[in-house]
Amino acid sequence: MANGITKHIPNGITSLNLFCGCIAIIQALQGNILVASILIIAAAVFDFFDGMSARALKAYSPIGKELDSLADCVSFGVAPGMIVYFLLKQATAVAAICPFMTSYFPYIAFIIPIYSALRLAKFNVDERQTTSFIGLPTPANALFWLSFAYSVQAYAYEGNPVFIGVTSVLILLTSYLLIAEIPMFSLKVKSLAFKGNEVRYILIISAIVLIALFQFMGISATILLYVLLSIFNKKK
């Protein structure tokens, strides 16, 4: 068991995850999509290391588990939802479809944090998710949306009315994937051997190629590939 200051290290790292998520929300509201995206990525890094440090220091605690879920809900639910809300707000204003669309339709983005919260609550009580996942993990969903949003803004697609429809469909699809009963593999490995880790190496190599070719947009493509590989791996 961890003692002294070491037992607080994992929760301290989790708090940094939460801090990054809070600042990402502010940046998203100000339209700084790139900065918000970088902060969400930083939150994902802290999310990875808080679990690693808890295992290394044997500093597990019920409070740590709950704090981790709350931090993830903010960083990987509310923050990406706010990014998508900002883009939809811009898009509906540019499209000038009708006042109702401009004022209220962008709120559809908050389906993302709602289903992220459901996903995290399900994870906390689901004993099947010890070595793999059931449904799309919230950090993966957040990475998809920050990549999508930055790419849309970078190429000025948000002024296209088609963007509103595509984004709405993607919100519903990814929200479903968060709580779907679809087994998805974890990147945690017991050994670095290729045998038994084939699907993980395929994803990692593909991610490197996709990001090299498409930069930020490659992250969204990688998440979609992760979902497809998980479905294919399940059928084997």
Image: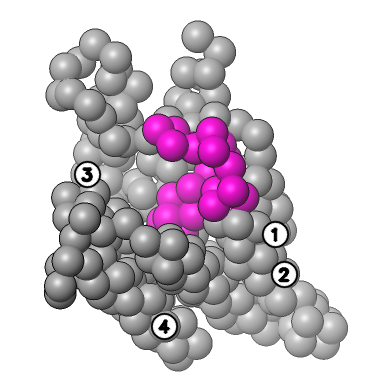
Between circles 2 and 4, the one closer to the viewer is 4
Q: Which mark is residue 108?
A: 2
Q: Is residue 39 above or below residue 215?
A: below
Question: Which residue type carries mark 4?
Answer: Cys
On the rendered image, what quadrant is the N terminus found in? bottom left
Q: Residues within 10 Å of mark 2 (few under 14, many from 20)?
A: some
Between circles 3 and 2, the one closer to the viewer is 2
Residue receiving disc 3: 212
Distance from disc 4 to disc 3, alpha carbons, whole Å, reads 30 Å
Q: Residue at x 38, y 76 (%)?
A: 18
Query: Residue 178: where, in percent of width, then height?
Result: 60, 48
Q: Is residue 180 left or right of residue 135?
A: right
The count of marks equals: 4
Q: Residues within 10 Å of mark 3 (few under 14, many from 20)?
A: few
Question: Mark 1–mark 4 contact, CB under 8 Å?
Answer: no
| Start-end of magenta stretch | 122-143
Pointer 4 or 3: first along the chain: 4
Q: Residue at x 30, y 70 (%)?
A: 11
Secondary structure at badge 1 equals helix
Q: Which mark is residue 168?
A: 1
Query: Residue 227: where, in percent of width, then height?
Result: 50, 34
Distance from disc 2 to disc 4, alpha carbons, whole Å, reads 20 Å
Magenta stretch encompasses residue 142: yes
Question: Mark 2–mark 1 contact, CB under 8 Å?
Answer: yes
Pointer 3 or 2: first along the chain: 2
